[in-house]
Structures are given as C-alpha cells and as structure tokens.
Image (spheres, rainbow, N blue to C red):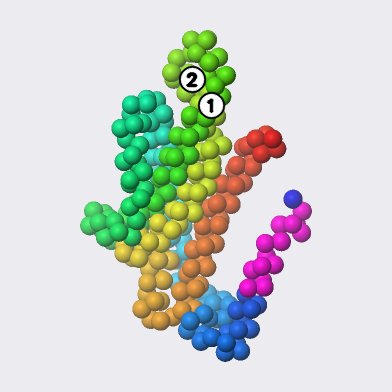
C-alpha cells in the first residue's frame, strides 16, 4: 500500500480537528464542554510527565491482561472443542460471564485483589478473554470436513488431529479474536483504573473531579492511541503470518 493511501484516514481527522478548533475559538460552544484541540495538545505537553507515567502504567496492565486473556481463552477453546458434552456444559456459562458488565464487577475486583495493578489487570483480562474463546472455538471447529475425514481414514489420534489439523485451521480466527481482545483490554484496564486507581483511568477520574475537560480529552486520546497500537501489532503479525490467506 502506498503512503498516499495510508494517509487517507488522516483527512477526516484533520477536518474534524479543524472544525473543533475553529468552533471553540469562535465561541460556538463553551470550552468546558468541548475544548479546542490546541488546548488538549497544550495540556499533554504541560503535564507530559504525569501522562507519560500513566500511559506506561496502563500499557503494562492492558498488555498483561491481554496476554492472560490470550492464554486462557485459547486453553478454554481447546478444552471445549475436545468434547461436545463439555461444550454443552460450560459454553453457556462462558456466554453469561461475558454479558456481565465489567463496571458492575469492578468493585468486587477491588475487594478480591485490592487497589492497584492486580485489579486493573484482572479487569483487562476479564473483558478481553471471551473474543479469544469464541474465535478460537469457532476456528477449531472450522477444519475442512474432507481433511477431517482423511485424518479419520488414516486413523490419526485425537491429539494428532488437534495439533496437525484443528489448531492450524484455527490460526486465522485466533488472530481475529486477539485483534478484538486488544482493544477491549485497554477498555478493561481503564475501567479497572477508575476503581483501582492509577494509569490513564485514574487521570480521567481526577480530571473529572477537577472539571479539567482538556485533561480528560488528553487522557482519552492517549488511551485510544494505546488501543490502536495494540491492534496494529496484531494486524502486522496477521499480515506477516497469514499472507497466503490474505491474498486468497
């Protein structure tokens, strides 16, 4: 892809930022409702030390929670795919677990894990585990019927079929689940920081109490960039690992 095409998504962003800057400067709305982008950039620069530390803390917690979700979701998907009876018994609970809002259970996480990083990591992992589980399970069950019959004809064992057929067939779906989970891990981490303290979520919480809307926007912008960065890492890995699938 050429650089001109890569830069195409910047035009809408530049247009919206220009409109917001002009509207705020012209007094079309109050700055405390929607600050000018220049105010947000100035806030980022003035409080760069605070934002830098908060960004690093959220990055670590979100990445760790994401990694836990990848490992746990993949393991659960493998377990459920091995037996129809196990799937029928436990999959409804997995779906129910995903429907519980993390905001509702965040206070419980504080009770269980205490304030600080453990609660934030747990929130990130809980929010992001289900996409990995769902995508991994669907991928493990998506193996070609013809190849499955061939493995059965060759009397391949369950483990041989799993590692030589089902897991390779599930790689594209697992990477898709990892991509979705990357963005959700950042959301879970920020929500966990609302109650557990620290990171960008803590900055948003404190800035809201101080009515520093420019600081809230700055923290939200950094969290968005963090999620975009994690998703971009998965996209790069997907493009490199699955170039044959992508071309087809």
Vertical order, 41 against 132 (above or below): below
Q: Earlier in the sequence, mark 1 or mark 2?
A: 1
Number of other residues with Cα within 10 Å of mark 1, as a class: few under 14, some 14 to 19, many 20 or more: some
Residue 206 x/y as whole percent: 37, 75
Q: Position of residue 152 (x, y in %)?
A: 50, 13
| Residue 4 forms part of the magenta stretch | yes
**Horizontal side of residue 213 vs 98, given as left or right:** right
User: Is any part of residue 92 visible from this angle?
Assistant: yes
**Mark 2: few/some/many CA within 10 Å (<14, 14-19, 20+):** some
The residue to which callout 2 is attached is: 161
194, 155: nearer the viewer? 155
Question: Residue at horizontal 50%, vertical 49%?
Answer: 180
Query: Toward the viewer: 121 or 101?
Result: 101
What is the span of residues highlighted in magenta in the rendered image? Answer: 2-16
In percent of the image, x 66 and y 67: which residue is there? 12
Left or right relative to 28: residue 134:
left
Say if the magenta span includes residue 165: no
Can see residue 167? no
Separation (CA) of disc 1 from disc 2: 10 Å
Residue linked to disc 1: 143
């Amino acid at each position: 892809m050429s650089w001109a095409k890569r830069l195409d998504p910047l035009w809408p962003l530049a247009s919206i930022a220009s409109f917001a800057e002009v509207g705020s400067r012209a007094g079309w709305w109050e700055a405390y409702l929607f600050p000018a982008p220049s105010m947000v950039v100035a806030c980022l620069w003035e409080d760069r030390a605070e934002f830098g530390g908060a960004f690093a803390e959220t990055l670590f917690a979100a990445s760790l929670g994401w990694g836990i979700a990848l490992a746990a979701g993949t393991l659960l998907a493998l377990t459920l795919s091995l037996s129809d009876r196990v799937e029928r018994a436990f999959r409804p609970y997995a779906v129910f677990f995903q429907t519980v809002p993390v905001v509702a259970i965040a206070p419980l996480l504080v009770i269980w894990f205490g304030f600080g990083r453990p609660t934030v990591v747990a929130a990130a992992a809980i929010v992001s585990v289900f996409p990995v589980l769902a995508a991994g399970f669907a991928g493990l069950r998506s193996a070609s019927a013809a190849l499955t019959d061939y493995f059965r004809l060759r009397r391949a064992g369950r483990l041989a079929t799993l590692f030589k057929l089902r897991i390779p067939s599930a790689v594209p779906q697992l990477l898709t689940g990892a991509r979705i989970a990357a963005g959700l891990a950042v959301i879970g981490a920020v929500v966990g920081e609302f109650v557990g303290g620290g990171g960008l979520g803590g900055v948003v919480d404190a800035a809201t109490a101080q009515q520093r809307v420019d600081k809230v926007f700055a923290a939200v912008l950094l969290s968005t960039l963090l999620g975009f960065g994690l998703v971009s890492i998965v996209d790069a890995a997907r493009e490199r690992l699955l170039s044959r699938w992508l071309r087809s």
